[in-house]
Amino acid sequence: MEINEKQIDIIKEMLNIGVGRAANVLNTMLKSHVALYVPNVQIINIDMLEKTFQLAKDQSTAGVQIGFEGDFSGLSLIIFPMDSASKIVSEVIQDNVSKTGLNSIQSGTLTEVGNILLNNVIGTFGNMLNTHMRYTLPEYFNGPVTNLIDMQKISSSAMILIAEAKFTIETLQISGEVMLIFEVDSFDLFIEAINSL
């Protein structure tokens, strides 16, 4: 299904509402000002992932994934370069964190942050599109993003919505990617729901 600029603008607006709600929760959690916004959205297929994804194939990343089901189903992810993941966790636990990896307590902290963000994004989509969404439990992951996609055994016909997410926590500049992966039938239903707004 082809999508146009108006549909992209609606998706971007919903994403910004979702991350804005997440920022309000994180403000309280971190006791510091958190600003979150989504400056860029693109929709690609699996084959285009390696060419267009901003995090290099061999770059170490950390993130959280949550599956969702309802009128449309798929997988949501928030993915950070390891440097950004370390900054977020350091800010939450008020302690220095290695930039090369997270221990179990630190990964649990990132999982909670990712859970807040993804639940608010998916919840906003569900509310605005008037559909009930069920979620799986959040799961932490690390490693190259393309390995994660392979591991999920996502269908080659799946469509991926990638939203560039920018975080500002006080003076920290943190970047990440929010991804929603839809099977083709689910993606078509998602776009139809967007059109009905």
Image (cartoon, rainbow, N blue to C red):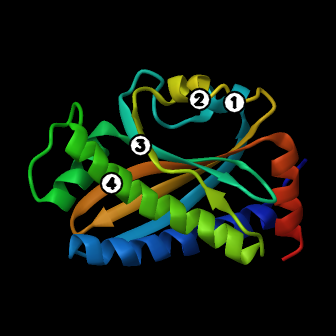
According to the image, label 3 marks what residue? Answer: 63
Q: Quadrant of the C terminus?
A: bottom right
Q: Residue at x 43, y 64 (%)?
A: 116
Q: Earlier in the sequence, mark 1 or mark 2?
A: 2
| Residue bearing the label numbered 1 | 154
Q: Is residue 77 left or right of residue 87?
A: right
Measured from the top left, where is residue 98 in percent x and y? 15, 37
In the image, what residue occupies the spot 29% across and 43% down? 107
Q: Is residue 65 left or right of residue 23?
A: right
In this rendering, the count of numbered labels is 4
- Type of amino acid at the residue the image marks with label 1: Ile
The reply to whether dot 4 and dot 2 touch (C-beta < 8 Å) is no
Cα–Cα span, label 4 and label 1: 28 Å
Residue closer to the observer: 103 or 53 = 103
Query: Disc 2 designates what residue?
Result: 149
Sequence-wise, which precedes: disc 4 or disc 3?
A: 3
Q: Give the alpha-carbon distance from disc 4 to disc 2, as whole Å.
A: 23 Å
What's under tag 3, amino acid-wise?
Answer: Gly
- Kindly indicate whether the residue at mark 2 contacts the one at mark 1 (C-beta within 8 angstroms): yes
Residue 4 picture location, percent across and down: 84, 58
Answer left or right for 64 relative to 88.
right
Q: Which residue is mark 4?
A: 174
Dot 4 crowding, Cα within 10 Å, few <14, some 14–19, many 20+: some
Mark 2–mark 3 Cα distance, whole angstroms, equals 13 Å
The correct choice, above or below, for 32 with respect to 106 in the image is below
Residue at the extreme left: 95
